[in-house]
Image (tube, rainbow, N blue to C red):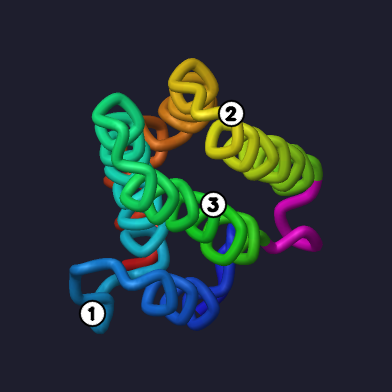
Amino acid sequence: MTSPFGRSGALAQAYRRIGAETSVVDADPHRLIELLFDAYAECLVQARGAMLAGQTEIKGRSISRAARIVDEGLKAGLDLDKGGRLAADLRDLYEYVSLRLVLANVRNDVSILEECSRLIEPLRQAWKDIRPQATRAVN
């Protein structure tokens, strides 16, 4: 199944690759993206906690996982042909967030992690809010 925002097979594969701890077998494309957003947010919470606790290895793993979610899940799942300008804008945002995550890791900078969270959180919330319409459109 294809939607303007991504291909369900590619999204499921990306989600499995990043090792999320939830079943994606029965998830529709909308739910898969929602799971990616949730996993991203959780990674940032873990990274922030690890950063503040001086746990360098956990911080690095959490930021790396967040970056993989953005690059291999959210960005890779975009359909630039069908998504038009919105998909292109999301791609640009995801590229920026990926760069900022690397910088947050290198500089050990909590404020950059918070920026990355603030940039994606409105999308995450909007995605959750449109679930009823997305479900009706598929059925």
Whether residue 4 appears in this view of the structure is no
Residue at (38, 66) in percent of width and height: 138
Judge from the rendering whether residue 18 lies leftward or rightward of residue 93; answer left or right. Answer: left
Dominant secondary-structure state across the stretch colored magenta: helix
- Mark 2 sits on what residue? 107
- Mark 1 sits on what residue? 26
Q: Find the distance from the CA under tag 1 to the CA under tag 2.
A: 40 Å
Q: Find the distance from the CA under tag 3 to the CA under tag 2.
A: 16 Å
Mark 1 or mark 2: which is in front?
A: 2
- Mark 3 sits on what residue? 67
| Residue type indicated by callout 2 | Arg
Q: Is residue 41 magenta?
A: no
User: If you read the primary sequence from the N terminus, does the residue marked by circle 1 or circle 2 appear first?
Assistant: 1
Element assignment for label 3: helix
User: If you read the primary sequence from the N terminus, does the residue marked by circle 3 or circle 2 appear first?
Assistant: 3
Element assignment for label 1: loop
Q: Find the distance from the CA under tag 1 to the CA under tag 3.
A: 25 Å
Read off the magenta span: 79-84
Task: Write down the quadrant of residue 17 in the picture.
Answer: bottom left
Mark 1 or mark 3: which is in front?
A: 3
In which quadrant is the C terminus drawn? bottom left
Residue at (42, 77) in percent of width and height: 12
Judge from the rendering whether residue 9 lies leftward or rightward of residue 49; answer left or right. Answer: right
Q: Position of residue 16 (x, y in %)?
A: 37, 78
Q: Position of residue 59 (x, y in %)?
A: 37, 44
